[in-house]
Image: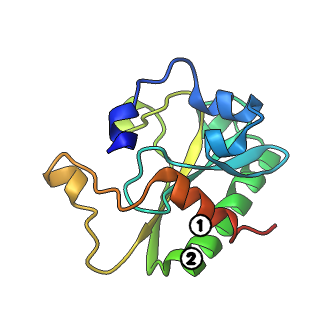
């Protein structure tokens, strides 16, 4: 409840803040690459919901370089491996919401969602109940995944 009560609307770009920040735990940055990084979703659809994010502030896939795309997809693969090991995920939704009408919550800074799924999970809650079920704090998820990440 302290997590929910403390939630504030971000000012500026949270991803740009994470790129330049020096406290990865505070920004929930799990792993960095030359052109992208892996970060926990502060408002997850499921425990272990992470995002691979470009370092560069760009919002369209058509503006992404091959090197940036390579780093993004490497981080997605690393995340799937770590989440599978730690949470025993049975599947994943991996995707990009480009533009507000497509559901992008953070416009103009491209990121790839990696959402773990389990048979019979509660993913419908966000759609039907306009609510999210968060089984653990972001700090707990950070600690669990950080120990699993390699590469």
Residue at 49% x, 55% y is: 95
Residue situated furthest left in the rendering: 128
- The answer to whether residue 100 is above or below residue 31 is above
Quadrant of residue 75 within the rendered picture: bottom right
What colour scheme governs how the chains and residues are painted in the rendered image of this protein? rainbow
Check whether the beta carbons of the residues at disc 2 and disc 1 lie within 8 A of each other: yes
Badge 1: how crowded within 10 Å, few (<14), some, or many (20+)? some
Residue situated furthest top in the rendering: 11
> In the rendering, at what x and y percent does residue 111 appear?
58, 44
- The answer to whether residue 148 is above or below residue 107 is below
Q: Which numbered circle lies on residue 144?
A: 1
> In the rendering, at what x and y percent does residue 26 appear?
63, 40
Residue situated furthest right in the rendering: 34
- The answer to whether residue 88 is above or below residue 40 is below
In three-dimensional space, the C-alpha distance between marks 2 and 1, rounded to whole angstroms, equals 7 Å
Q: Dividing the image into 4 quarters, which one contains the C terminus?
A: bottom right
Instruction: Name the foreground residue: 3 vs 8.
Output: 3
Residue at 69% x, 40% y is: 54
Q: Secondary structure at mark 1?
A: helix
Please state which of the two labelled residues, at mark 2 or mark 1, is closer to the viewer.
1
Q: Which residue is mark 2?
A: 86
Instruction: Name the foreground residue: 138 vs 62.
Output: 138
Badge 2: how crowded within 10 Å, few (<14), some, or many (20+)? some
Which is more N-terminal, label 1 or label 2? 2
Count of marks placed on residues: 2
Quadrant of residue 62 within the rendered picture: top right
Q: Which numbered circle lies on residue 72?
A: none
> In the rendering, at what x and y percent does residue 122 appear?
25, 66
Report whether 107 appears left or right of 73: left
Residue at 39% x, 32% y is: 7
Residue at 41% x, 51% y is: 44
């Amino acid at each position: 409840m302290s997590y929910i009560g403390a939630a504030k609307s971000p000012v500026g770009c949270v991803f740009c803040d994470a790129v330049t920040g020096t406290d990865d735990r505070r920004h929930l940055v799990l792993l960095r690459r030359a052109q992208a990084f892996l970060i926990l979703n502060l408002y997850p659809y499921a425990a272990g919901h992470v995002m691979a994010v470009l370092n560069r502030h760009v919002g369209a896939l058509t503006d992404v370089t091959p090197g940036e795309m390579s780093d993004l997809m490497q981080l997605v693969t690393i995340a799937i491996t770590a989440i599978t090991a730690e949470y025993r995920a049975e599947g994943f939704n991996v995707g990009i919401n480009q533009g507000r009408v497509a559901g992008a919550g953070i416009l103009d800074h491209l990121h790839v969602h990696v959402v773990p799924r389990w048979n019979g999970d509660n993913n419908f809650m966000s759609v039907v109940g306009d609510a999210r079920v968060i089984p653990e704090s972001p700090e707990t998820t950070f600690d669990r995944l950080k120990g699993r990440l390699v590469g």
